[in-house]
Image (cartoon, grey):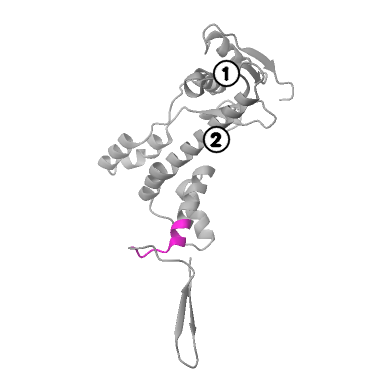
Amino acid sequence: LYCSLAFSCEKCEHTIQINTSKMIPDTKHRDINICVQLASFLGAHLAGIGRAGVAKIFGAMNIPRPVKEDHYEEIDRKLLLPCIKKFQHQSMEAAIYEAVDENDGDPTSLTVSGDGTWQRRGFKSIREVAAVLSCNTTPKVFDVQHLSKKCVICIGELSVKNTDSDLYDEIISNHDYESNYDGSSGGMESKGIQDIFKRSFSKYQVQYTRYIGDGDLSVMWDLTQHPSYPGIEIEKIEDINH
């Protein structure tokens, strides 16, 4: 991904060599290669295509293949994911502070809107993400909750179990178990919204006392039957534009 340009003088034969990318100290790698790899890892993580997707893109662009799967997973788990979570938390925390500053009444009682989205349409999806947003002029995300009925890593590594049981045991013992929901797909949204409400005070020291939602009655029913804040009734505001 880099080239070396050489300029020679016809009279004195002195040559000047210019590299388009610097060498990383104590290695044989150029920094542009590392930058491209890290940028591709970040894009793959955010887009959800993984190393396999990066390999296809690199192949189409005639770029050398990315690092091996185990190195990719290590970089993703130890470097990228902690950074993404850190900035995600900072962004949502800033949104809370902004909503508190703009709130005319009790600064700790906020009006929020919420909704969920499935990985696939219908009521058979095994994954769902619920989100709660501010109701300011420019809505911003306060919190998100990911729900999954299966663990992709546990399922994907079954092929390794018969060929290398030691590697399988190591992967299973060190990975983050994704499955955190065992109900119906239709109940994922209400469960995710309820989890977000329950941790609002411990996480941000605020309470979501007014909820703007669509016609999904199960969400409001769960919030009413399982109060997140003792002694406080959550008011439902119907979103007619949903």
Front in this rendered view, residue 225 or 228: 228
Q: Quadrant of residue 164?
A: top left
Q: How far is mark 2 from mark 1, CA to CA?
A: 18 Å
Asked if one can make out residue 94 in the rendered structure from this viewpoint, the answer is yes
**What residue sits right under mark 2 in the picture?**
91
For image coordinates 44% across by 44% down, the residue present is 80
Q: Amino acid at mark 2?
A: Ser
| Span highlighted in magenta in the image | 27-35
For image coordinates 49% across by 62% down, the residue present is 63
Count of marks placed on residues: 2
Task: Tell me if residue 239 comes above or below residue 93 in the rendering.
Answer: above
Label 2 neighbour load within 10 Å: few <14, some 14-19, many 20+:
some
**Picture coordinates of residue 43, whole percent (x, y):** 52, 48
**What residue sits right under mark 1 in the picture?**
108
Front in this rendered view, residue 192 or 141: 141
**Residue 29 highlighted magenta (yes or no):** yes
- Say which of marks 2 and 1 sits in front: 1
Asked if one can make out residue 65 in the rendered structure from this viewpoint, the answer is no
Label whose residue precedes the other's in the sequence (2 or 1): 2
**Residue 138 highlighted magenta (yes or no):** no
**Picture coordinates of residue 84, whole percent (x, y):** 48, 40
**Picture coordinates of residue 227, whole percent (x, y):** 53, 10
Q: Amino acid at mark 1?
A: Thr
Front in this rendered view, residue 89 or 157: 89
Residue 82: image tag:
none
Which secondary structure, mark 1? Answer: loop
